[in-house]
Amino acid sequence: MRCVGCQAEFAQIDGPTHEYMLSSPGCWAAYGEVLAREYSDNRLAQLHRLTVDTYAVQHPGVNVPAARRSVAVHLSRLYLLLEAGWSMERANNAMLAITEFKDRCDWLEPPSMTGTLSVLEVLQAASNEEHENRARARAESVWKAWAAHHDTVRNWCASL
Ligand SMILES: [Zn+2]
């Protein structure tokens, strides 16, 4: 079953999905397993927010207020981490300021996610090192997919 968000193929299962980050149930379940692994290992724990940000903008959903705010917050943090080179701590400290402008952000028409790495590829990593490499490559691939909107995100974050 092709995921409506990331476009990757997942086993057809019955299960929950997120309210506005639209995905297939198989993708949502795989994401939960990736998060569980990151929670259970100190080295992988530092990836947690990057994984969350990446998933959110890889599964942006449709133009409703909660999805607009989610894309604004998570795309901004991806920008700070991946392009602006901010540390995780500094990017976290900016969350309050991002929260203040997120309501004024326009909906960005989501790009195609074809060719981005899925959570399944992270989940199938054979070691922690591979997990980390794939999680980072996945984040880069999704940020790159949003290229048409990079200038808008840079403008959002210009005041930070
Ligand atoms: Zn997906």
Image (cartoon, helix red, strand yellow):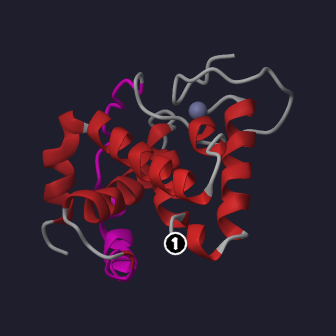
Q: Is residue 18 visible in the rendered structure shown here?
A: no
Observer able to see residue 111:
yes
Please, is residue 87 above or below residue 11 in the view? below
Q: Quadrant of residue 145?
A: top left
Residue 38 position within the rendered picture, expressed as x and y whole percent measured from the top left: 65, 63
x, y percent for residue 105: 29, 53
- Count of number-bearing discs: 1
The image quadrant where one finds the N terminus is top right
Q: Is residue 76 magenta?
A: no
Q: Which residue is mark 1?
A: 46
Residue at 63% in and 36% down: 120
The image quadrant in which ligand 1 is located: top right
Is 159 in front, or is 25? 25
Residue at 75% from the left image edge and 41% from the top image edge: 29
Q: Nearer the viewer, residue 88 or 124?
A: 124
Q: Quick check: 81 left or right of 74?
A: left
Task: Say what secondary structure mark 1 lies in.
Answer: loop
Of residues 66 and 153, the one drawn nearer to the viewer in this rendering: 153
User: Is residue 105 toward the left or the right of residue 9 in the image?
Assistant: left
Residue 106 inside the magenta-drawn segment: yes
Query: How far across and how far down the image is residue 92, in percent?
Result: 40, 77
Q: Amino acid at mark 1?
A: Gln
Q: Residue at x 76, y 22 (%)?
A: 11
Residue 6 locus on image (x, y percent): 51, 30
Give the residue drawn at x 32%, y 31%. Answer: 109
Q: Residues within 10 Å of mark 1 (few under 14, many from 20)?
A: some
Relative placement, left or right, of 22 versus 58 is: right
Range drawn in magenta: 89-113
Predominant secondary structure, magenta span = helix
Q: Which quadrant holds residue 148?
A: top left
